[in-house]
Amino acid sequence: MAEILFYHLQRQPLEAVLPILLVKTLERGWRAVVQAVTEERMAALDDHLWTFSEESFLPHGTDRESHAGDQPVLITLAGGNPNNANVRFLVEGADLPADIATYERMVVLFDGNDEEALQTARGQWKAVKEGGHEATYWQQDERGRWQRKA
């Protein structure tokens, strides 16, 4: 059964949080798929993951590339698991996949300063719980440390 984590972004934007979580995912030897909703977000994340750190980059690609299945981190707009990822990241309110249980971990990142994003995340939380899955809710404290709230 997948471990499902909800990250309530209030103090840092997605572009600051996602790369850190992806690095930790790769350090565990896992593969990741990041599902966005818009072409613009997918392109922005693709660009950002190459340059987010001066010391390193995240090896990744998009599902538009010919060898998408070989990517350790794949950014997509679609469902499915083309790179056999262990972890699925949902951004921009991307829908929960039907195959949640096939992942080690599912991470829902949502903007706490956007009312629509909050409502979408609440609906996803409810669907996860009704589906019998375990979920945890994380929020940053004043120092920027993630605290489990539920």
Image (tube, rainbow, N blue to C red):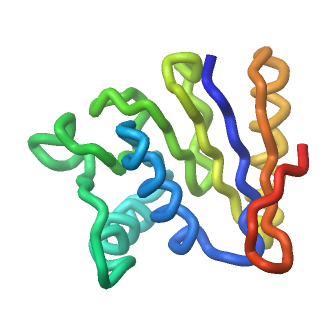
Q: Which residue is painted at 83% across and 64% down in the image?
A: 115
Q: Which residue is painted at 75% across and 68% down in the image?
A: 145
- Quarter of the image where one finds residue 80: top left
Q: Is residue 52 above or below residue 115?
A: below
Residue 54 locus on image (x, y percent): 31, 84
Q: Of all residues shown, which one is farthest toward the left?
A: 66
Q: Of all residues shown, which one is farthest toward the right?
A: 150
Q: Which residue is painted at 59% across and 56% down in the image?
A: 92
Residue 65 locus on image (x, y percent): 15, 48
Q: Which residue is painted at 38% across and 32% down in the image?
A: 85
Task: Tell me: 106 left or right of 5.
Answer: left
Residue 64 locus on image (x, y percent): 20, 48
Query: How many marks are shown on the rendered structure?
Result: 0
Residue 41 locus on image (x, y percent): 44, 65
- Quarter of the image where one finds residue 78: top left
As rendered, which of 60 and 53 lies closer to the eye?
53
Q: Is residue 22 above or below residue 1?
A: below
Quadrant position of the C terminus in the picture: top right
As rendered, which of 25 and 134 lies closer to the eye?
25
Q: Is residue 14 above or below residue 61?
A: below
Task: Tell me: 37 left or right of 47.
Answer: right
Quadrant position of the N terminus in the picture: top right
